[in-house]
Image (cartoon, grey):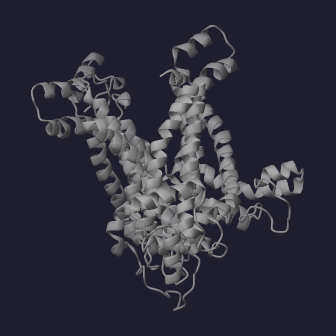
């Protein structure tokens, strides 16, 4: 963790005594009381307290909670089967939103609302898998490079530089072309394209920790190298990585939807994936704009949610902001 | 300064080497053999045999790599399976469109993002500040293709104010000596064409520039906030310099360092975003060409296109670094 600060500022959480209320105790007494209550708190507990007071992050959490609820309870929420065609009196044609079909019907007469709800499952899965791949491989590479240094570091970082020399989405396109189209392949492609970002971030973060006194102390009492890495350096290097991971969740959703838009996504056109739904309805934009706008908005809301949480986390974990409400 | 440029150029070599290796092995990892991959689906056994012979695919790998490098260094990326044209010729035709679009998008992002971020920092916590935070948040959260579709629907389909497809009206037949339509129209003093070309650029440029706009506004705000509280700014104010002079000479000049870095970093975003933007607006640039190549499994186009875009990206980053060193003396010395 960052060096724990014990100079905890005075705060007046709701329900506690605040000097403005002119209670019978003096201001000094009130402050002493609170300092005792607030005393040594962990980084995470303090970060959590700060993040739930950040209105932006709260809005983000509401969005993501909605996304998770939609994904988990999709069969209960969705009024129709997302794959059932011809709800439009058996006709395979689109229809604008109506009372029966909130978001309208798509070109095969499928209920758009149900499809959007089921799409949440794909979006969450896409984000988590892509970030999981980028994060785990990036962490391994970054940790090895940062901790061992020397030629291992040089080689690994040059490889990362080469990957970074191809703009992100194009790298993902190249990998997806290699693996062939499909949802899994696209998730892998987007994940792999994120590896260099995480590797560089963790490497930098580890290098910053290496010179710290506690690392020197551990080394001088003879703690083994791996042990120093896992129990001293890594836990202290993770907070920028966590912030980045939240923001990359947002980028991954955008990129996967983008690859879906380019036709590299799920090859089964019945899959209710938002990017694919958007592509499908792009041709009917003039007549049925809602068919494109609604999956588009669904993507924006989830991406916005992760971005808001990421920004909130960044502020909550940044030592510069510590102690500020 | 010269030493800095030379050292930076030398650092490019391992990157370019790695890039060539990556693309070389990427083609070999594509589904099917490289000959089938690069020739496309119409490849007959005779064609494949001829191709293997011509490109030395029966040779050991290191020899293949060497001859591949040689043909790449002569700007030979093979022929497109879809159009049967030289990939290099197609790049020549299409790159000006993408460059023009990217420049327009960058112009939009910079000319709006910097003032927005600057005034947000000046009125910290005020209405402009909140508005700029909101705009930049939406800007980074809205995928290029969603914004593109919305813009196209509203301004082209519904209102009919701006064209939503192509680069120039099909009825206009004019010469394009440079391939940059805006520049061509200015050079030939053809103002009807100029108006038409600019109109065609507006929607794609706004769609493509939205994310860079958001990022630039954010970074400008943060940079100006940082610099504003420095001692030298306080000193400048204290000695009675007019506020505008303080802003120009002390605040903006120092805030320019992070802002210029972030502007340079947008080039990658613009080049990847171009694939989606050009597809939505049927804009005949490198991006749409690559998107079609994915669709057609046109691997020689993908190979040449990705190499070319990566090369442009690396080269632009080099220029950004040099400009950065020019405005920041500390970098030059170290």
Rendering quarter of residue B296: bottom right
| Camera-nearest residue between A210 and B233 | A210
The mark total stands at 0
Residue at image location 32% in from the left, 35% down from the top: A205
Q: Dividing the image into 4 quarters, which one contains the N terminus of chain A?
A: top left
Q: Position of residue B284 (x, y in %)?
A: 68, 63
| Camera-nearest residue between A99 and A22 | A99
Rendering quarter of residue B293: bottom right
The answer to whether residue A269 is above or below residue B164 is below
Q: Position of residue B94 (x, y in %)?
A: 68, 60
Can residue B128 be seen in the rendering of this structure?
yes
Can residue B143 be seen in the rendering of this structure?
no
Residue at image location 47% in from the left, 62% down from the top: A174
Residue at image location 45% in from the left, 58% down from the top: B65
Residue occupying the far left of the picture: A222
Residue at image location 35% in from the left, 39% down from the top: A154
Q: Dividing the image into 4 quarters, which one contains the C terminus of chain A?
A: top left
Q: In the rendered view, does A29 fall on the left or right side of B80?
A: left
Residue occupying the far bottom of the picture: A90
Rendering quarter of residue B263: top right
| Camera-nearest residue between A270 and B279 | B279
Q: Position of residue A224 (x, y in %)?
A: 12, 35
| Camera-nearest residue between A39 and A313 | A313
The answer to whether residue A99 is above or below residue A235 is below
């Amino acid at each position: 963790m960052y060096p724990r600060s014990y100079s905890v500022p005075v705060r007046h959480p709701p329900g506690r005594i605040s000097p403005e209320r002119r209670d019978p105790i003096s201001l000094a007494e009130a402050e002493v009381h609170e300092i005792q209550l607030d005393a040594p708190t962990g980084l995470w507990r303090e970060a959590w307290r700060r993040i739930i007071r950040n209105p932006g992050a709260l809005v983000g959490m509401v969005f993501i909670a909605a996304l998770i609820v939609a994904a988990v309870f999709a069969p209960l929420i969705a009024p129709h089967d997302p794959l059932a065609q011809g709800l439009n009196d058996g006709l395979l044609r689109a229809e604008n939103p109506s009372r029966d079909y909130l978001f309208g019907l798509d070109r095969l007469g499928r209920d758009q609302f149900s499809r959007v709800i089921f799409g949440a499952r794909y979006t969450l899965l896409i984000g988590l898998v892509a970030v999981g791949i980028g994060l785990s491989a990036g962490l391994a590479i970054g940790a090895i490079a940062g901790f061992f240094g020397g030629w291992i570091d040089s080689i690994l970082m040059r490889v990362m530089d080469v990957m970074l020399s191809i703009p992100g989405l194009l790298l993902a396109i190249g990998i997806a072309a290699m693996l062939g189209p499909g949802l899994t392949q696209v998730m892998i492609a987007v994940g792999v394209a994120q590896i260099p970002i995480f590797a560089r971030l963790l490497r930098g973060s580890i290098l910053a920790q290496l010179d710290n006194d506690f690392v020197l102390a551990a080394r001088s009492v003879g703690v083994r190298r791996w042990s120093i890495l896992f129990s001293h350096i890594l836990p202290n290097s993770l907070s920028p990585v966590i912030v980045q991971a939240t923001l990359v969740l947002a980028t991954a959703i955008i990129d996967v939807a983008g690859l879906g838009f380019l036709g590299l996504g799920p090859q089964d056109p019945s899959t209710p994936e938002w990017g694919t739904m958007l592509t499908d309805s792009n041709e009917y934009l003039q007549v049925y704009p809602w068919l494109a706008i609604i999956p588009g908005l669904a993507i924006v809301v989830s991406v916005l949610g992760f971005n808001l949480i990421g920004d909130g986390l960044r502020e909550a974990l940044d030592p510069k902001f510590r102690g500020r409400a | 300064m010269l030493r800095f440029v030379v050292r930076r150029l030398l650092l490019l070599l391992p990157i370019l080497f790695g890039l060539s290796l990556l693309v070389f092995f990427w083609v070999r990892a594509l589904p099917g053999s490289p000959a089938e991959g690069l020739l496309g689906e119409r490849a007959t056994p005779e064609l494949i045999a001829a191709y293997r012979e011509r490109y030395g695919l029966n040779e050991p790998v290191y020899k293949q790599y060497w001859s591949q490098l040689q043909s790449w260094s002569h700007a030979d990326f093979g022929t497109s399976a879809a159009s049967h044209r030289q990939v290099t010729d197609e790049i020549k035709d299409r790159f000006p469109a993408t460059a023009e679009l990217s420049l327009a998008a960058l112009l939009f992002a910079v000319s709006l993002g910097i003032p927005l971020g600057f005034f947000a920092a000046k009125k910290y916590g005020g209405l402009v500040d909140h508005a700029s935070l909101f705009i930049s948040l939406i800007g980074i959260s809205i995928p290029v293709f969603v914004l593109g579709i919305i813009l196209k629907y509203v301004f082209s389909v519904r209102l009919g104010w701006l064209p939503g497809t192509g680069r120039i009206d099909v009825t206009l037949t004019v010469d394009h000596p440079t391939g940059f339509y805006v520049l061509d129209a200015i050079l030939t003093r053809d103002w009807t064409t100029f108006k038409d070309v600019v109109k065609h650029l507006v929607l794609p440029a706004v769609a493509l520039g939205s994310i860079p706009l958001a990022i630039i506004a954010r970074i400008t705000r943060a940079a100006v906030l940082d610099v504003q509280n420095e001692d030298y700014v306080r000193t400048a104010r204290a000695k009675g310099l007019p506020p505008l002079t303080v802003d120009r000479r002390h605040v903006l000049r120092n805030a320019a360092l992070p802002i210029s870095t972030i502007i340079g970093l947008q080039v990658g975003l613009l080049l990847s975003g171009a694939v989606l933007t050009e597809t939505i607006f049927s804009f005949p640039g490198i991006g749409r060409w690559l998107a079609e190549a994915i669709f057609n499994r046109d691997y020689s186009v993908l190979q040449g296109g990705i190499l070319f875009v990566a090369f442009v990206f690396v080269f632009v980053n080099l220029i950004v670094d040099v400009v950065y060193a020019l405005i920041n003396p500390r970098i030059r010395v170290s």
